[in-house]
Image: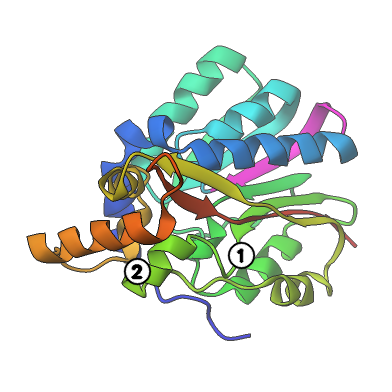
């Protein structure tokens, strides 16, 4: 399987760093995804004490706080591209006091995250990776038999409104590609696809939402006023409901797999 995306990680870090203060207010789809992920995990892994736990792409700590609410661990390792996310993890541990922890900033595709973990979790992050096969192999190498991999990403038809009008967006691995990558290492207990539709007053509110969640990291340049007006007009024409609100459609995958 070829690389899915070639991402400028410095640009990505800059966009997400700028969005840290607004992310939790805007990241409604991501928060719904995290709630679903923890619900899935609890069905297969009852809450209690774990060994080592790694979360990749922890961001402002929404999935982290779900994990901390239900599990204790001998050691926690949290990773994110942005050093600024460390403060959010520090605040969570002041609240939950769930054992020793460490925050490691940097690109998870480049860092040495090797170890032996009971659980590796990653929500709404791996779509930004440039080499998904290598990442899956690295994850598998850090999980002993019976350990868990909890992950969400997005389907190839994610954010169709944006792709329709801009022609731009990430390229995502599809379900068959994911299952082919997982099959040598994992028993896949759950692979589900969902749709989360958010509604906004107009296209400008959609663009603000995307900027304030860091999702505009793939865009280049600044649109002219005329281009922006054209985009807004077409968005309204194609994606408005009877109330005049416009849609933005997230289409996540949920994955729960156990190391063979």
- Name the spot of residue 144 as percent of width and height, x first: 84, 56
The residue depicted at 56 percent of the width and 67 percent of the height is 157
Residue 42's image quarter? top right
Q: Secondary structure at mark 1?
A: loop
Q: Residue at x 90, y 52 (%)?
A: 146
The percent position of residue 209, horizontal first and vertical second, equals 34, 43
At horizontal 50% and vertical 67% (from top left) the residue drawn is 129
Which residue is at the far left?
225
> Of all residues shown, which one is farthest toward the bottom?
2
Q: Which residue is mark 2?
A: 165
Give the vertical position of 114 relative to 130 (above or below): above
Left or right placement of residue 179 versus residue 202 in this view: right
Distance Cα–Cα, label 2 vs label 1: 18 Å
Work out which quarter of the rendered image holds the C terminus and state it.
Answer: bottom right
Badge number at residue 155: 1
From this view, report whether residue 43 is shown above or below residue 138. Answer: above
Q: Which residues are magenta?
A: 45-56
> Which mark is in front, 2 or 1?
2
- Vertical position of residue 140 compared to residue 79: above or below: below
Q: Position of residue 24 (x, y in %)?
A: 42, 31
Magenta span: chief secondary structure: strand
Q: From this viewpoint, is residue 12 visible?
A: no
User: Is residue 99 part of the magenta span, yes or no?
Assistant: no
């Amino acid at each position: 399987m070829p690389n899915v995306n070639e991402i400028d990680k410095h640009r990505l870090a800059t966009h997400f760093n700028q969005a840290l203060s607004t992310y939790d207010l805007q990241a409604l789809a991501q928060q719904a995804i995290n709630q679903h992920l923890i619900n899935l995990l609890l069905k297969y892994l009852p809450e209690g004490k774990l060994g080592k736990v790694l979360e990749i792409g922890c961001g402002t700590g929404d999935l982290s706080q779900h994990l901390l609410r239900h599990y204790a661990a001998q050691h926690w390792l949290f990773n994110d591209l942005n050093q600024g996310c460390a403060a959010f993890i520090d605040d969570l541990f002041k609240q939950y006091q769930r054992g020793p922890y460490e925050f490691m900033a940097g690109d998870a595709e480049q860092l040495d995250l090797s170890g032996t973990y009971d659980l590796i979790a990653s929500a709404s992050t791996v779509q930004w990776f440039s080499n998904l096969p290598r990442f899956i192999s690295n994850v598998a190498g850090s999980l002993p038999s019976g350990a868990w991999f909890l992950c969400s990403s997005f389907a190839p038809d994610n954010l169709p409104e944006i792709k329709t009008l801009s022609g731009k967006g990430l390229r995502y691995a599809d379900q068959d590609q994911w299952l082919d990558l997982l099959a040598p290492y994992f028993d896949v207990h759950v692979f589900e696809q969902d749709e989360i539709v958010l509604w906004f007053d107009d296209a400008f509110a959609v663009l603000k939402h995307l900027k304030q969640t860091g999702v505009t990291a793939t865009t280049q340049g600044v649109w002219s006023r005329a281009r922006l007006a054209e985009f807004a007009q077409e968005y309204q024409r194609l994606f408005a409901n009877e109330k005049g609100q416009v849609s933005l459609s997230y289409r996540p995958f949920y994955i729960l797999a156990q190391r063979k």
